[in-house]
Image: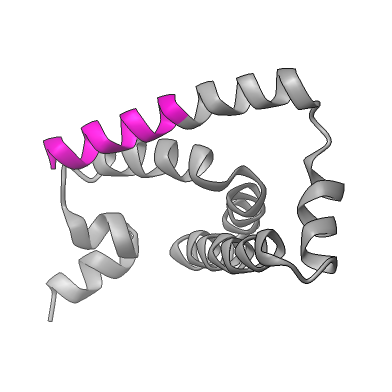
Amino acid sequence: MAMFRIFLGAVFAAIAIYTIITGTSHGWNLVPVFFGDMAAMNWPGQFNFDFFTFLLLSGLWLAWRHHFTPAGLLLGIIGVFGGMLFLSAYLLVASIRAKGDIAEIMLGRARASAIGKQ
């Protein structure tokens, strides 16, 4: 679990630094570039489309993990737009709260407890 947490911290730091440098150099208006590449039907667009489906899956998982409550839906939306920058921080906090219990990290406390009772 320590290596996983180190990985999450490193990913968070690397993406944060990369994002700051890119945003400072090229502006913060990513949406037209991101979706414009997809509309162009080129390789950058294909990558963006593939990546976008990962973002959607991440958001869906976050909402599901929180039982589609209003807070869970909000976390899902933040996950879609925040990408790995958000997900790395979320998983780091979740791993600490769950004391390294991977079932709880992946399923949430209620589902992990229900599985443990079987």
Image x and y of residue 109, in percent: 30, 58
If the image is split into quadrants, where does the N terminus sit? top left
* 62 to 30, vertically: above or below: below
Question: At 79% across and 29% down in the image, what residue appears?
Answer: 28
* 108 to 19, vertically: above or below: below
Judge left or right: residue 104 versus residue 15. left
Question: At 44% across and 63% down in the image, what residue appears?
Answer: 65
Front-lying residue, 75 or 21: 21
Question: At 58% across and 50% down in the image, what residue appears?
Answer: 79
Judge left or right: residue 26 versus residue 91. right
Point out the residue furthest to the bottom here: 118
Residue 10 lies within the magenta run? yes
Image x and y of residue 25, in percent: 73, 20
How many numbered marks, from 0 up? 0
* 40 to 84, vertically: above or below: below
Q: Give the range drawn in magenta.
A: 1-14
If the image is split into quadrants, where does the C terminus sit? bottom left
Q: Main secondary structure of the magenta part?
A: helix
Front-lying residue, 3 or 108: 3
Front-lying residue, 47 or 116: 47
Image x and y of residue 100, in percent: 16, 45
Where is residue 21, by image quadrant? top right
Image x and y of residue 50, in percent: 59, 68
